[in-house]
Amino acid sequence: MRAGIAFLIVAYTLSQFYRAFLAVLAPALEADLGATTEDLARASGLWFAAFALMQLPVGWALDTLGPRRTASVLFLGGGAGGAALFAMAQGPGAITGAMILIGIGCAPVLMSTYFIFARTLPAAIFGTLAGLTVGVSSLGNILSAAPMAWAVEVFGWRETVAGFAVLTALVGLGIAALVRDPPKPQGEPRGSLFDLLKMPALWPILIAMFVCYAPAAGVRGLWISPYVAEVHGAALAQIGTATLVMGLAMVTGNFVYGPIDRWVGSRKGPIMAGNLAVAVLLLFLWLFPPSGFTGAIVIFALIGLFGASYPIVISHGRSFLPPHLTGRGVTLLNLFGMGGAGAMQFASGPIYAGLARGSSPAEAFGPLFALFALVILIGMAVYAFARDRVD
């Protein structure tokens, strides 16, 4: 089981890589394929949308078929197949199709890991393990930053992505060979998604999931690259540095958020404080935009640090789930998290394109970041009514 978990964590590391690598590939894709920022925002948004929509069938599959078959089949077919299609793309449409396939392939990986944790380990350590898993896997964010920029310069973007397609296939085969499905409890009751939706305690947490991941994912996954390039004149190497610093901050945030509920005796408090801090930082980018590259990177790093509350929000929601609906429950939470990121990413492209007409880049980016902040504030206003719970 340990070897199987290790392969699932490597697979989720690749998932983190794929959702963020467009930020570094953007200049090459624009030069070779004519892909605009709006095209890449659409492709990124559809990655998240595909990932989110797959959560419902993935939840059923985890409870019914188990994590081994669910994760290995989708990761091999969608993840490796989508990466191969990306490497052969001849236009923005193929990039979009490839990102959708990769999103489908990556959809079951983290939830398979959480399913095994929830079924086999004490509930009190779920949050710590959830944060540790996401923290280690966030190395994919780092891989998609400066190392990716170096590989693209040395080997070319097609060759680099083709290499990751091969690696994805090998990891998928490892999952099929090594993951073990946890045993089902005897006499387990039956249930459905509708039983979860009837639980009032879950709804404020689902709204928090919808808004908590969107800003960090959106900025790190796409917007940091055009911002530092167009506002501060950053070259490819500097873009790689900027995304690397924000990625490291997100890794640190995941490690901090994981066990924080046991440190402070609350889940709701750290979630509220961290997300409100992100909203303030985004508003600062709008009202007091930094004049230099270094100042911008510091703000983006803080957004990554405080915006890494995803694992503790999942943990808060999991604490209300009945055991026989673990698979459907964690995937429902993940649907809202990835759905929120996808919706914001999908909408941000046309919004920025409209703002950029007749405006300087700095004037266009400010209102875009303010919109991210507004979404967080609305979500936290709803989450304020959530019931706190610590295992």
Image (cartoon, rainbow, N blue to C red):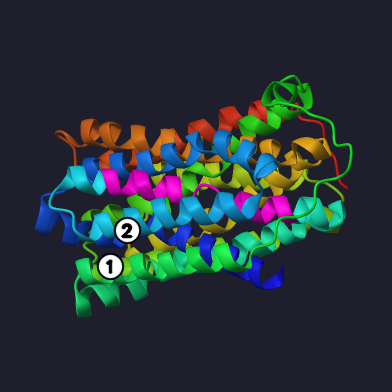
Q: Which residue is mark 2?
A: 83
Q: Name the amino acid, label 2.
A: Ala
Q: In this view of the protein, can residue 307 be seen by the observer?
A: no
Q: Judge the density around disc 2: few (<14), some (14-19), many (≥20) Cα neighbours within 10 Å.
A: many
Number of marks in picture: 2
Task: Give residue 384's quadrant in the image.
Answer: top right
Q: Earlier in the sequence, mark 1 or mark 2?
A: 2
Residue 113 inside the magenta-drawn segment:
yes
Stretch of the chain drawn in magenta? 97-116
What residue is shown at x 47% (from left), y 50% (from top)? 74
Residue 381 inside the magenta-drawn segment:
no
Q: Name the amino acid, label 1.
A: Ala
Q: Nearer the viewer, residue 315 or 261?
A: 315
In the image, taking residue 288 as reference, residue 174 lies left or right, namely: right
From this viewpoint, which residue is outermost toward the bottom?
154
In the image, taking residue 241 as reference, residue 174 lies left or right, namely: right
Check disc 2 and report its element: helix, strand or loop.
Answer: helix
Q: Which residue is mark 1?
A: 162
**Secondary structure mainly formed by the magenta segment:** helix
In the image, taking residue 129 as reference, residue 222 lies left or right, namely: left
Q: In this view of the protein, can residue 63 be seen by the observer?
A: yes
